[in-house]
Image (cartoon, rainbow, N blue to C red):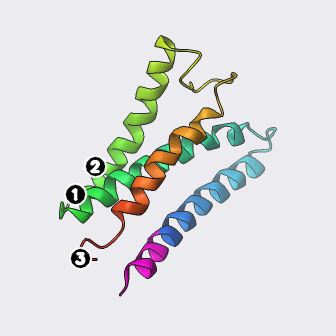
Amino acid sequence: MNTPRRLAYRLVLAATTAIAVAAALAAVAAISGSPTPRWTERVPEAAFAAVVALACGFSLMRRGDPLGGAAGVTAGALLPALVAALAFRWPGRIPSFGPGPTHNRWWLLALLPALAACRGSSDPAT
């Protein structure tokens, strides 16, 4: 199987999982009867955590590590928390979990791990 097809399969699987989680959140919000929660404000942080997990997992799996997925999940959970903690030190430069003028910078932070995930998901033989 060539590399672009393998990358497409992996990205489709990741997108399907993300859509399923979003649908489950929307269903819980609709069933609970409460006003719609502001979960849409958490999408940038979730996207950052997802691409960090994918980048870490893909790069470790490419190197032959059998536990790349577990390391990716751990990195996806810890790195957003580290970035948010650093936001207390540099509040005007680094985004935090709360609303503010730098909140949209999560999207910018997600670009580098997204590029790393694309690179790490390629077949090392090619």
Q: In the shown orientation, is residue 41 left or right of residue 87?
A: right
Q: Which residues are magenta?
A: 1-10
Instruction: Tell me which label, 1 or 3, sits earlier in the chain.
Output: 1
Assess whether mark 1 and mark 2 are in contact (beta carbons under 8 angstroms).
yes
Instruction: Pick the residue in front: 69 or 104.
Output: 104
Q: Is residue 1 above or below residue 35?
A: below
Judged from this view, the residue extending furthest toward the front is: 126
Q: In the shown orientation, is residue 63 left or right of residue 123?
A: left
Instruction: Tell me which label, 3 or 2, sits earlier in the chain.
Output: 2
Counting other residues with Cα less than 10 Å from the Cα at mark 1, is it few (<14), some (14-19), or many (20 or more)? few
Q: What is the x, y in percent for residue 43?
A: 63, 44
Label placed on residue 67: 1
Location of residue 21 by image quarter? bottom right
Assess whether mark 3 and mark 1 are in contact (beta carbons under 8 angstroms).
no
Q: Which residue is mark 3?
A: 125
Number of numbered callouts drawn: 3
Residue type at numbered disc 1:
Leu
